[in-house]
Image (spheres, helix red, strand yellow):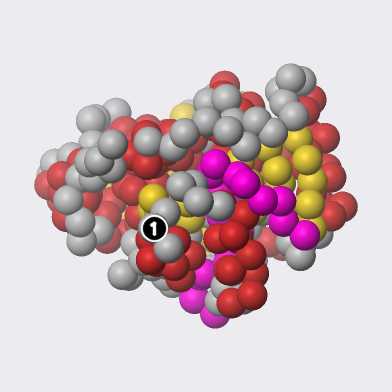
Amino acid sequence: MTRLVALLGDPVAHSLSPGMQNAAFEALELDLRYLAFRVEAARFAEALGGLAALEAVGTNVTVPHKERAFALVEAHTSEAACCGAVNVVTFHGGRTVGHNTDVVGIRSALALLDAKQGSALLLGAGGAARAAAVVLVEQGFSPLHIAVRDLQKGQRFAEDLTVRRPQTAVELHPLDALPGGCALVVNATTLGLPGNPFPPSLLQDVLAAGGVGGTVLDLVYAPGGTPLATAATERGLRALDGTDVLLEQGAASFTLFTGRPAPLDVMATALGRHVATRFPS
């Protein structure tokens, strides 16, 4: 009997996860099918319960539901607990377990970028930003500048982060007053997704915040690269969009769903790229 693996989010039409995961299932001859479902916030709990009732293997969770999923699952892995956000839910004997594989993808992307330590600018305060913050803190980026549109949400995020990581030096900024001289810039907002373009003036401010010789990681992905990653590369900065993060977090998710090592080459091919290598030193 074919079993279901899902993706829950809003939006999901742009997602490359179904093609990537289904290619991996087919390569290993697994009787699994990965489907994406657009789910409004008000119905997320209902959707998660429906997957459990259907005896689905599990689900990936994407914007804007990662913090919501954290609050709903019955158990968390240590990485999910550190983030306060969940991007994978597995079902074991009717019990929901929350994981966070975003941290795996972000760690891998920063290794590819060979990002140098220093101050970091993190755009956003949602579930992806929570995973990014955990990785940035563990890798010694300080201070961590968090820039947000909603200052109240940003303040809650900053306070939660300092509770989970008491030694973290966090500074909060509105999007129209970004700091300068940051060694690393990470976009963890939805700016750049279809229907949500990156404002040109903000794009220039973000690039200026990175200064000379900095690195940029955009967690959004798009065919041919995102506006932020493309503009950063044109400026001579080391930059990646979110495709490599998607690949690595997807491979970790695959292993959680199947108990098998992920066929990384197959998944990379499904994304239209080779397995990435490090930037030259």
86 and 239: which is toward the camera: 239
Whether residue 54 is visible here, answered yes or no, is no
Q: Position of residue 149 (x, y in %)?
A: 76, 62
Q: Which residue lies at the image location 44% right of the left edge and 37% below the top edge?
A: 115
219 and 32: which is toward the camera: 219
192 and 39: which is toward the camera: 192
Q: Which residue lies at the image location 56% right of the left edge and 52% below the top edge?
A: 210
Q: Secondary structure at mark 1?
A: loop
Bounds of the magenta span?
177-196
Whether residue 220 is visible here, answered yes or no, is yes
Relative horizontal placement of residue 224, taking residue 23 as reference (left or right): right
Relative horizontal placement of residue 121, taking residue 155 as reference (left or right): left
Q: Position of residue 95 (x, y in %)?
A: 55, 31
Q: Is residue 187 magenta?
A: yes
User: Based on the displayed image, in which of its 4 quarters is residue 250 positioned?
Assistant: top left
Q: Is residue 233 magenta?
A: no
**Residue furthest toward the bottom?**
195
Q: Position of residue 12 (x, y in %)?
A: 47, 66
Which amino acid type is shown beneath numbered disc 1? Answer: Gly
Q: Which residue is mark 1?
A: 236
Q: Which residue lies at the image location 76% right of the left edge and 20% below the top edge?
A: 166
Q: Which residue lies at the image location 79% right of the left edge and 52% below the top edge?
A: 173
> Is residue 15 placed above or below 49 in the rendered structure?
below
> Is residue 191 placed above or below 264 in the rendered structure?
below
